[in-house]
Amino acid sequence: MSVEPLELPPQHTGVELSELTLVAACALPEGTALWPVRAVEASPAKAVPVLGPCVVCGPSAAVEELIRAELCAPIYVVSESTATTLAGHENVTIAGVADGEWEGVVGAICSRHIATIPQMILEHACATPDAPAVADASGEISYAELVSAAWRLGGALTDELGLAAGGTVGVLLSENERLLAVTLLALGLRRIVPCHLSTFAAQRQLQLERLLQLPRGCSAVLVDRQLPDGADAAAGSGVRVLRLDLAMPALAMPTAVMPTLARGPASNGQTTGVTTGARDGAPPPLDERHVEPHAVRAAHAAIVREGGKHGTKDGGSALLDESFIDWTSGSTGRPKGMATTMWRMSHWIRWRAFHWPLRRLGGRVAMGLFLPWYWHIPLAQGGTLVLVPKPLNVDVRGLMAYLGERRVDWIDCLTPGQLQMTTELCSAASLPPCLAHVMCSGEALPVGTARAFLRKFPKVSLSNVLATTETSADICALVRVDLALCDRLGDAVSHVPVLCSREGQGQGCVVWGNSVELNAEGRLVHTGLNMEAGYLPGDDSSSFMVTPRGHACVTGDCGFWLDADGEGGDRKSVV
């Protein structure tokens, strides 16, 4: 199942999505206020002119009539017509628009006004600089404080390491969640590629060895604690291991922005932590190095214009940058590396914003185990990233209390194991009343686990997400898992589906421009926009192929299609 094919790759037309208006030449459905693009209805009878950049969408005859009325000047149109141009304007063909199917239209528009993750975060920082961006047990920091800290940290790292755009660094920041979030944004602002490293020494050594075999190598490994043997393979390779929990002379960060990891002196005599400032309850000193969001936005734009190592034909687009390097689980004995392109990450963030809008679910989103992969989702939408302290990932009672203290609206994600422990150990009264939704991912979700959770906590809704290394994270989801579905499944299957073949009514969806299918062996095959061409050079990429619909990957995951409505039903689910 997939939304109709979009352009490959998504592009930026020069108009920000926030500046654009979707002008519907027919009736719009309910809930358009939650879409990631502003939408209005218009017709010659209403005679309401639309100012600013816009896209006219709807049945071709209605689109032509609206354009002839000269109520707007679209930069392109979207209709069911297969004509290249319509009423003198470029036409994007989406067959379903004539039948009132709007998700394909929104997906097509979002793909034409894509922006990088740093650009999306900076847009919100400039619009609402005082809004809370990151919250944790130490308090909150605003968007202005976040981007200033990230920009300065990035500058200190580039000065210290001599990094340039396109460089790669290993990231192993497992002790301080706020430091990890700021560091990932800092690297993104400088167009430096972070590579997530495992906390398990054996896997980390294999990962580092793979990075060092690449032509571009690895410039440094960033850590927040002392590692045995100098971060394993990096020790004897000439790769520098830089501890961010130790002060850097080029960086003076207020403790309010970057809490220190420890209070005592380090072994080299330096004060631990990447920050300087007052402690023991005293007010922090005035931050004289603060950089305003608009200044950071302009400086980042200059770096983008320079092109960098991965500059595109226009000399400035950062959409084709590698945004992140991740690894497979290593179940075959050797972890495989996957470099994810920026526009693919940005593309599924917009899909996320369509199906799980912050304005409906709430803007305070908690993250724990999934932080390195999902940290940017709320920040790219102007929400608040609530960081879950590492110990609470195995303490569900403490986790629920923490979510209440931090006024969390939903959590992204809990594993099925965490979901089960929450059901077994927490009373209905102990769940914070602010918690309205839970995303579940990481493993197959047992039907019994979902049923027990929903019965015990009926006020909390649940989604089941399938994410893979090969698809830059999310690829499909069952948007709403409810008791009715669990009861229909009964004992027929052991696990909740990750996808339904018929969209609508919150049942299930695939990231725009992709498909999830099963081959003759019952293995899941992912095809479309979010597929890269293969793993890092040197890794076996024989599971990847090129198809008329784009790159595809035959995964190691197995599944089957299930008749979820009983015998003779027409809704099929992949399990």
Image (spheres, rainbow, N blue to C red):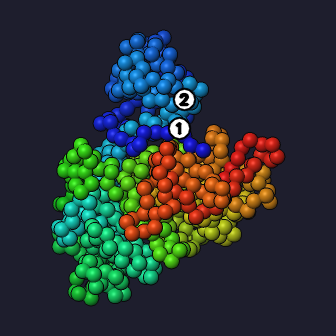
Label 2–label 1 contact, CB within 8 A? yes
Q: Which mark is residue 4?
A: 1
Q: Give how far across and how far down residue 265 sits, in percent.
A: 27, 85
Is residue 214 toward the left or the right of residue 424 in the image? left
Q: How many residues crowd around disc 1 within 10 Å: few (fewer than 14), some, or many (20 or more)? A: some
**Earlier-in-chain disc, 2 versus 1:** 1
Q: Give how far across and how far down residue 184 sits, in percent.
A: 34, 62
Location of the C terminus by quadrant is bottom right
Q: How many residues crowd around disc 2 within 10 Å: few (fewer than 14), some, or many (20 or more)? A: some
The front one of 444 and 262 is: 444
Q: Which mark is residue 95?
A: 2
Is residue 564 toward the left or the right of residue 154 in the image? right
Q: Secondary structure at mark 2?
A: helix
Q: CA distance from mark 2 to mark 1?
A: 8 Å
Is residue 216 toward the left or the right of residue 41 in the image? left
Looking at the image, can residue 362 be seen? no
